[in-house]
Image: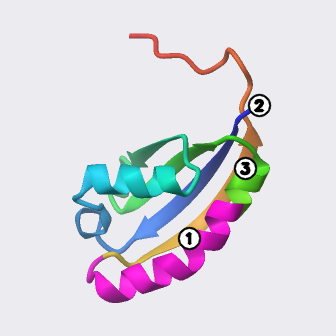
Amino acid sequence: MTVSLFWRVQTGDFNSWLNPDQDGLARMMQSQGVRAYSVHRGTDDQNAVMVRMEFADRAAVEAFEAWYGPMSQEWQKEHAGSQHEIVDRWVGDDVPGYARQLA
């Protein structure tokens, strides 16, 4: 069963925070065990973001978060405007058959 990690992120400036290299970001995420992800921007606060990431299992989530902490600190030092704070996190088992594209 797959597992999803949800992060509620507060950015200083969404447009500066968002990685412009979508393909590079996808390759980096995949290399760290992410099977799928989506980014959602707040309608009331445009700098509030929800990120959903799907992993094979809980161990993959834990490995990703262990990698992300140090990598994120370095990234934020090197890329002005990428500052952000993970305000909340939630991990849950995906329920088979209850994720669908309906359009």
In the rendered structure, are the residues bearing label 1 and label 3 in contact, judged by CB atoms less than 8 Å apart?
no
Image location of residue 59, percent across then percent down:
77, 54
- Residue at label 2? 1
The residue drawn where x is 72% and y is 49% is: 91
The amino acid on which the numbered mark 3 sits, given as a three-letter code, is Val
Q: Residues within 10 Å of mark 3 (few under 14, many from 20)?
A: some
Q: Earlier in the sequence, mark 2 or mark 1?
A: 2
The amino acid on which the numbered mark 2 sits, given as a three-letter code, is Met
- The overriding secondary structure of the stretch rendered in magenta is helix
Q: What is the C-alpha distance between the residues marked 2 and 3?
A: 13 Å
- Residue at label 3? 91
For the record, the magenta segment spans 63-81
Which of 24/92 is in front? 24
Q: Is residue 44 visible?
A: no
The residue drawn where x is 34% and y is 75% is: 12
> Vertical placement of 68 versus 34: above or below?
below
The amino acid on which the numbered mark 1 sits, given as a three-letter code, is Tyr
Q: Earlier in the sequence, mark 2 or mark 3?
A: 2
Q: Quadrant of the N terminus?
A: top right
Residue 30 falls left or right of residue 81: right
Image location of residue 63, percent across then percent down:
69, 63
- Residue at label 1? 68
In the rendered structure, are the residues bearing label 2 and label 1 in contact, judged by CB atoms less than 8 Å apart?
no
Q: What is the C-alpha distance between the residues marked 2 and 1?
A: 23 Å
> Vertical placement of 28 versus 57: above or below?
below
**Residue pushed farthest front?**
31
Q: Earlier in the sequence, mark 1 or mark 3?
A: 1
Mark 2 lies on a secondary structure that is loop
Q: How is the image coloured?
A: rainbow
Mark 1 lies on a secondary structure that is helix
The residue drawn where x is 69% and y is 55% is: 61
Q: Is residue 91 visible?
A: yes
